[in-house]
Image (spheres, rainbow, N blue to C red):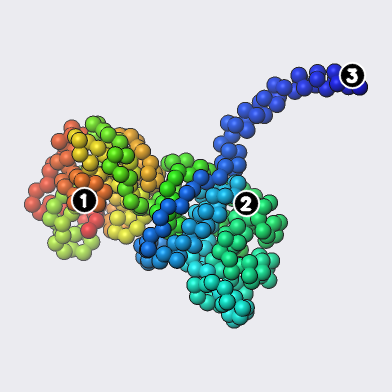
């Protein structure tokens, strides 16, 4: 016995360095960390409504009941080990696509389903609930699937999921973290229309940003290209103080094409007021934060297309800068991110009401939703540029476009 013990001790001595390397490898491997972590999301107040816009430009309003179901999905995901923030967003995308975040009965196949709390009646085969899960496919009983918490747990799946090992939930899909979000949602739902989930990616991101109050631990970084969304700005005392102002595009990469003030709109041909300064640049040119600050808007919608707004504290006052017309994947920050002057926050695009790749840049003294002033003058006053300032009749070139 003693001889075996001595051999075991010697063996451990030889293995110790290797075990140490394995431990270090696990600690340093971000993919492993992301896989093992929970999203750390906390649901705050659920608003009465939320206006959202899909990738296809469809604009609609979610009511409090729909947002409450989204809150349930977020809460369930935050309790399950291995579900990242991206995983929660995928689940919301799936529920938006399948039911528009409604807990649907199906009286045509299961008349008893209407006796459970529901938001209306569906009619797709024998599908039920938020994720349109089918009892005949093994997702659960009618009673189970008419429970939003059960449906969310089933969608996330994993070894502790109610449907393990089949049908597969998100955690049961090998490599789901490296898939596109729509692709991952399709892998769980196995829909006959696999491409439709991507349409709701910005909607799901806006819901997440609106309902959650804490930072996530995600497989993506703060510079994720996932389309973020608008939420309420942080309180003024949270805005980073800054004295340095930089030009929002790299030197030599841009041409000044549009001034602040009255102009002829290049799209409608009618008289309009241009609220920013337009700087034409090649598609994909890095957009830089003009000063240290906190991101208060990061969304893709409407005439702005890809829009980022950052609040700064400069000269003892709060001022916001806005950057518009990025492509959906050209936004590299999220609401709540703290950025520094000159940080790469996005890429020049031509989305929204735009006739060519350019940056529409605005300055809004007072904060995110305040009225804009002449951005060229503001940059000049802060020694960040030597731009011509607004004159009567100034406007954007028809080849570079602008916003309304």
For the residue labelled by badge 3, is the local secondary structure a helix, a strand or a loop? helix
Q: Quadrant of the C terminus?
A: bottom left
Q: Residues within 10 Å of mark 2 (few under 14, many from 20)?
A: many
Horizontal and vertical percent position of residue 155: 60, 59
Horizontal and vertical percent position of residue 122: 54, 76
Q: Quadrant of the N terminus?
A: top right
Q: Nearer the viewer, residue 294 or 333?
A: 294
Q: Is residue 2 above or below residue 55?
A: above
Left or right, 382 with respect to 241, comes to left
Q: Nearer the viewer, mark 3 or mark 2?
A: 3
Q: Nearer the viewer, mark 3 or mark 1?
A: 3
Gap between marks 2 and 1 measured at Cα: 44 Å
Q: Residues within 10 Å of mark 1 (few under 14, many from 20)?
A: few
For the residue labelled by badge 2, is the local secondary structure a helix, a strand or a loop? helix
Q: Residue at x 16, y 49 (%)?
A: 260
Residue under pointer 1? 370
Q: Most extreme residue toward the right, as rendered?
A: 1
Horizontal and vertical percent position of residue 23: 65, 29
Q: Residue at x 24, y 56 (%)?
A: 403
Q: Nearer the viewer, residue 264 or 145?
A: 145
Residue under pointer 2? 171
Q: Nearer the viewer, residue 179 or 126?
A: 126
For the residue labelled by badge 1, is the local secondary structure a helix, a strand or a loop? loop
For residue 145, which numbered disc appears in the image? none
Q: Residue at x 61, y 78 (%)?
A: 112
Residue under pointer 3? 2
């Amino acid at each position: 016995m003693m001889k075996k013990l001595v051999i075991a001790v010697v063996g451990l001595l030889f293995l110790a360095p290797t075990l140490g390397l394995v431990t270090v490898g696990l600690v340093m491997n971000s993919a492993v960390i992301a896989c093992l972590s929970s999203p750390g999301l906390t649901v705050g107040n659920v608003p009465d409504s939320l206006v959202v816009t899909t990738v296809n430009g469809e604009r609609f309003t979610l009511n409090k009941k729909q947002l409450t179901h989204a809150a349930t999905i977020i809460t369930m995901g935050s309790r399950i080990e291995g579900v990242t923030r991206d995983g929660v967003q995928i689940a919301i995308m799936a529920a938006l696509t399948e039911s528009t975040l409604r807990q649907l009965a199906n009286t045509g196949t299961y008349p008893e389903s209407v006796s459970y709390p529901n938001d209306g009646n569906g009619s797709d085969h024998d599908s039920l609930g938020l994720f349109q899960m089918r009892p005949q496919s093994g997702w659960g009983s009618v009673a189970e699937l008419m429970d939003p918490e059960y449906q969310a747990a089933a969608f996330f799946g994993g070894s502790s999921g109610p449907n393990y090992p089949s049908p597969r939930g998100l955690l049961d899909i090998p490599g789901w973290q490296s898939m596109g979000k729509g692709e991952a949602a399709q892998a769980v739902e196995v829909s006959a229309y696999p491409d439709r989930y991507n349409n709701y990616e910005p909607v799901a991101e806006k819901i997440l940003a609106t309902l959650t109050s804490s930072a996530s631990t995600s497989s993506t970084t703060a510079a994720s290209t996932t389309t973020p969304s608008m939420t309420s700005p942080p309180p003024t005392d949270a805005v980073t103080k800054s004295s340095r102002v930089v030009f929002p595009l790299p030197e030599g990469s841009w041409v000044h094409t549009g001034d602040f003030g009255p102009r002829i709109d290049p799209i409608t041909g009618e008289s309009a007021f241009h609220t920013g300064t337009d700087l034409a640049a090649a598609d994909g040119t890095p957009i830089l934060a003009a000063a240290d600050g906190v991101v208060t808007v990061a969304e893709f919608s409407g005439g702005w297309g890809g829009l980022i707004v950052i609040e700064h504290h400069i000269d003892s006052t709060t001022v916001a800068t806005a950057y518009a017309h990025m492509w959906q994947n050209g936004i590299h920050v999220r609401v709540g991110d703290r950025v520094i002057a000159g940080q790469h926050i996005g890429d020049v695009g031509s989305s929204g009401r735009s006739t060519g790749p350019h940056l529409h840049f605005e300055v809004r003294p007072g904060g995110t939703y305040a009225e804009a002033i002449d951005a060229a003058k503001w940059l000049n006053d802060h020694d960040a540029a030597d731009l011509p300032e607004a004159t009567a009749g100034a406007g954007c070139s028809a080849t570079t476009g602008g916003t309304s």
